[in-house]
Image: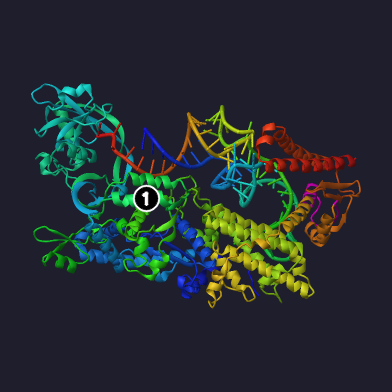
Amino acid sequence: MEIPKQYDPKEAEQHHYERWERNGYFAPEINKDPGAPVFSIVIPPPNVTGSLHMGHALQHTLMDVMTRHKRMRGYRTLWLPGMDHAGISTQLMVSRALKKEGKTRHDLGREKFVERVWQWKRESGGQITVQMRREGASVDWSREKFTMDEDLSRVVREVFVRLYEEGLIYRGNRIVNWCPQDQTVLSDLEVEKLPQAGKLYYLQYPIKNSDERVTVATTRPETMLGDTAVAVNPNDDRYRELVGQTIILPLTGREIPIIADEYVDPEFGTGAVKITPAHDPNDYEMGLRHNLPQVIVIDSHAKMTADAGADFLGLDRYRAREKVVDDFAALGLLDKVVEYDFSISKCERCKTVIEPLISTQWFMKMDQLRDLALGLMGRENKPEFVPETYKKVYTDWLENLRDWTISRQLWWGHQIPAWYTPNGDVIVARSEEEARAKAGASELTQDPDVLDTWFSSALWPFSTLGWPNETEDLRTFYPTSVLVTARDIIFLWVSRMVMMGMKFIGKEPFDDVFITGTILDAQGQRMSKTKMNGVDPIDVFDKFGVDATRLTLAQVGSTDTRWNEKQVESYRNFANKIWNAARFCLLNSEGAEVRPEILEQSRALHDRWIVSRLNKTARDLNAAIDGYEFHGAVQNLYHFFWDDFCDWYIELAKADVTAEQPGDARTKARTRLLTVLEQALRLLHPFMPYITEELWQRLPGNKRLHPAYRGAEPTVMLTAYPDGAANLIDEAAESEMQAIIELISRVRNIRSEMNIKPSERIPIIVAAPDENGRRVFSAAREQISRLVRASEVSVTERLEAPKASARAVLTGGAELAVPLEGLIDFEQERRRLQREQEKLQAEAAKLEAQLSNPNFVERAPAERVNEVRDRIAAIAQQSSQLRQTVENLQ
RNA sequence: AGGCACGUACGUCAAUGGUAGACGGCUUCCCUUACAAGGAAGAGGUUGGGGGUUCGAAUCCCUCCGUGCCUACCA
């Protein structure tokens, strides 16, 4: 058999995925057990025109680990993939492409433009699916969904109609966030607040029938053209008698009142605020409270309107700002201008400064829906957030929830299912025919707006499973088991899914929410396209392999982590280690094959030990994966495979396995080795799917699949994940093996400290006072000899060794001597032993101090106190033996 | 402005209130017949500072310093 010395990830990544997919292993139907428990995840759908970044790779790795693990545990498993149409960003992308051809979407018209987007989707949407296949994501492609698919669009209309009929969706005229660049309204969550160095302008407004003036402070002088009041705090003595008086608004000559409102902070600025209800959200609210008129002076292109006055009509808002300031200065009404830092709202997508505008839009009332989500959390503590800290983030946000602006002035998205009759009546219906029937008219115009992308995303957990039909999938897979996502969409997406799930299904969309950490760059900065500091997961795959990358990402879990390529490299080395361990097993496999039942038959210590380690590791891994403790899971796997299996088990079994003479003993040793390896590969599989499949396929023997997958073509994917049988965990074997490991380590330490050449064979003498100890050491004599390159291993009751020996005292009272006639440097040996003595004394001193504290003895659990006493006794014994050894040295 | 995290070895990160660990890097030795992407042995920490609770604190509380993130209607 030809097996290269180095693992080539690309080779293994080439063909396994294709076969897994073709054989239907990813689909839940592969599970033939009618009573199988269910595990399901819906993917957070990536933007159809995007490509995968490190955050996706992280999320997908975790979802795939869970899915593969549960599948191997016999669950009926569904991980449902799909993509999001991502209204604004997709439309922007296509618009940008058009711009390069010197066209705008208006040149094409709506229909042609949308067709163009679909074409774009067909061309670039495939990229993500290719990347996901590369990742090894075991998603069921047969159930792949796209938010703009016809069936999902039908769900959107259904939900819209039902919410409208209940009065939870309404059309209204309100102040909204408007992006003058994208020409659409945005929800509060799509607006980002950025700090900005700006100016605060102090403007003087003359009071009617008086020489007095009121000074107001503003960051947006141009909005003064739309002022309809000046407000002061009712308790502000400075302005008490001004309330009720009238101001002649400069540049316009309009008369506006001075009003009192609690909202005004007397401490800020001058304590008097200009009120522009049409162009500021707070002023808008105050305007409603005081019945103020709304004078619109800025239009949807952020240019001044006719109501701003003839001098300003058509000016850009920033140009208008300069002119207002100049005019005030000319009139002697500009009090002062000071530097002022504040935050400014920008469009999350295009970074244009948002213009608050009054506009007719569709809104969703959130009170009832919010209460459904809060009620669920209150009653059942669902969904359960991991880490728990996000529960507070989630509930706090829900508690302060306001109505959601759901319409968007875009062409790409779900067009709002509302039609208008010629006389302006609104008909909301599932289709145009239904609308016509309802209206009793045929001249209908559909609302041109589309819905916020997150509207359809909110329905994802059930729209993908066939709702509103009572489908088998919906019954089986809803609620899903866990949602894995990044923390920045807890509000945008997670909370809305909960509300919609509760509203329409009456059940939570998922039991748990696992929030992943963030991968930062080496400087601790967020990776972003604009900063160009992102690391492309595909490049990492190419360099180190998918499995190594997955292992790196899996251990990130929920912690923010700086990207460190060295970590991936070390897991690449781990993959190579696995490869070579398997290579060794396979090169020595003649006559042997995987046979699970053989593991429990051997009486040899190292065999019982590895079986115990294997089962303990399996037990811990199951608990870790179920508990979302991915870091611990990866550590466990790494150490089990590298330390226990490679460094110790293979070395201990090597003599038997590589024996030149064929025979029963050799075959059995080889069989055990292959069988342990096979189980280790199963343990590794959810994390490292490619290398495990590649190697598993090469293992000889009739390897069994999980009973639920009986009849499927063999694959490690469908084997049973070892469950860590308690009866195979052998504490006696583990502690006996520990003694041997300690002995070997001590001899190696002596060799190294004494500078004994690796090629030089030395005799060693082990003295164990107890019979069991002698039995254990004697039985392992050959192995010890091999691992420390000893010429001879004597096991005795009492230590009788030449003076010129290096010595060590082992845990449990056994002693070790390495006769080193002519090689030993007594002074060096004394120093070495003294260092050991000091270590012991330091530890003893700490423990004694604890024990001499009466409060400790009194209050600490007895169990704990005894532990300390036992340890002190053990140290005392070891220490006295060590002292003896030092004395004997002269 | 509030809120929430975080600060542990040179680096990246672990550690149910119970003797601070891993991996990488570093030092020394070894190309020993699975693997130099390897083997063996080492060095390296008063857990950001200070205070408190506790028999016992990296862990819980307070405070200060530093770093992130989120939310917010101060014109």
What amino acid is labelled 1 in the image?
Answer: Gly
Q: State the residue at coordinates (25%, 67%).
A: A115
Image coordinates for residue A506, horizontal then vertical, percent: 35, 59
Q: What stretch of residues is rendered in magenta? A: A747-769
In the displayed structure, A85 sits above or below A693; it is above
Q: Which of A736 and A353 lies nearest the eye of the viewer? A: A736
How crowded pointer 1 is (Cα within 10 Å; few <14, some 14-19, many 20+) is rated as: some
Q: State the residue at coordinates (77%, 40%).
A: A835
In the displayed structure, A226 sits above or below A794; it is above
Residue A760 sits inside the magenta stretch: yes
Determine whether the residue tagged by mark 1 lies in a helix, strand or loop. Answer: helix
Q: State the residue at coordinates (22%, 60%).
A: A416
Image coordinates for residue A479, horizontal then vertical, percent: 41, 61
Residue A82 falls left or right of residue A572? left
Q: Quadrant of residue A46?
A: bottom left
Q: Which of A271 and A578 lies nearest the eye of the viewer? A: A271
Can residue A807 be seen from the camera position used here? yes
Image coordinates for residue A477, horizontal then vertical, percent: 42, 65
Name the residue that disc number 1 marks. A375
In the displayed structure, A763 sits above or below B4; it is below
- Report the quarter where the N terminus of chain A lies: bottom right
Q: Which of A447 and A85 lies nearest the eye of the viewer? A: A447
Q: Which of A20 and A712 lies nearest the eye of the viewer? A: A712
Residue A149 falls left or right of residue B11? left
Q: Quadrant of residue A636?
A: bottom right
Residue A718 sits inside the magenta stretch: no
